[in-house]
Image (spheres, helix red, strand yellow):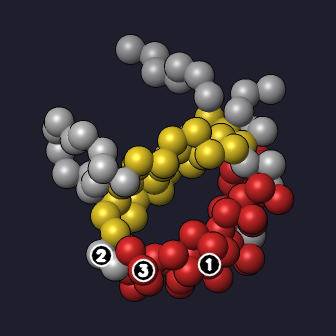
Amino acid sequence: MAKGYWLATGSIKDSKGFMGYVIAAEPYLMKCGAKMLIREPHTDVREGNPGHLTVLIEFPSLKAAEMAYEASEFQEMIALRTPYSECCLSILEEGDKARF
């Protein structure tokens, strides 16, 4: 089964305030079977403007990644993040899906 991923990029405006989200999200993600693959607060951005933070989280499947995001427990955590950061989060499935 193909794995699912959360790819988040963005900027943290207040790292002390942002820690409330981190403290809540880490145990929740572990409970969902997630694995932190990348957490880089000083991304070397060469093109575009995605922000200085990049996070890549792996889930057992695309469905698990979707369910983890859509769960009311996580939706409530978003309010802990938004005052202190700007974030773009994408949910992806492992594999090359591009057909040119």
Residue 82 in view in this figure = no
Camera-nearest label, 2 or 3: 3
Choose top left, top right, bottom left or bottom right for residue 61.
Answer: top right
**Disc marking residue 13:** 2
Q: Which residue is mark 3?
A: 16
Question: Is residue 93 toward the left or the right of residue 52 in the image?
Answer: right
- Residue drawn 62% across and 35% down? 93
| SS state under label 3 | helix
Q: Mark 2 or 1 closer to N-term?
A: 2
In front: 66, or 59?
59
- Residue drawn 27% across and 56% down? 51
Whether residues under marks 1 and 3 lie with C-beta atoms below 8 angstroms apart, the answer is no
User: Most extreme residue toward the front, as rendered?
Assistant: 16
Tell me the kind of residue under disc 3.
Answer: Lys
Tell me the kind of residue under disc 2.
Answer: Lys
Q: Which residue is mark 1?
A: 77
- 9 is higher (above) or lower (below) than 23: above
- 45 is higher (above) or lower (below) than 18: above
| SS state under label 1 | helix
Tell me the kind of residue under disc 1.
Answer: Met
Give percent across and percent down for residue 54. Answer: 40, 49
Question: Which quadrant of the rendered structure holds the N terminus?
Answer: top right
**In whole angstroms, how far apart are the C-alphas of marks 2 and 1?**
17 Å
**In whole angstroms, how far apart are the C-alphas of marks 1 and 3?**
16 Å
Choose top left, top right, bottom left or bottom right for residue 66.
Answer: bottom right
- Residue drawn 82% across and 59% down? 31
| SS state under label 2 | loop
- 44 is higher (above) or lower (below) than 96: below
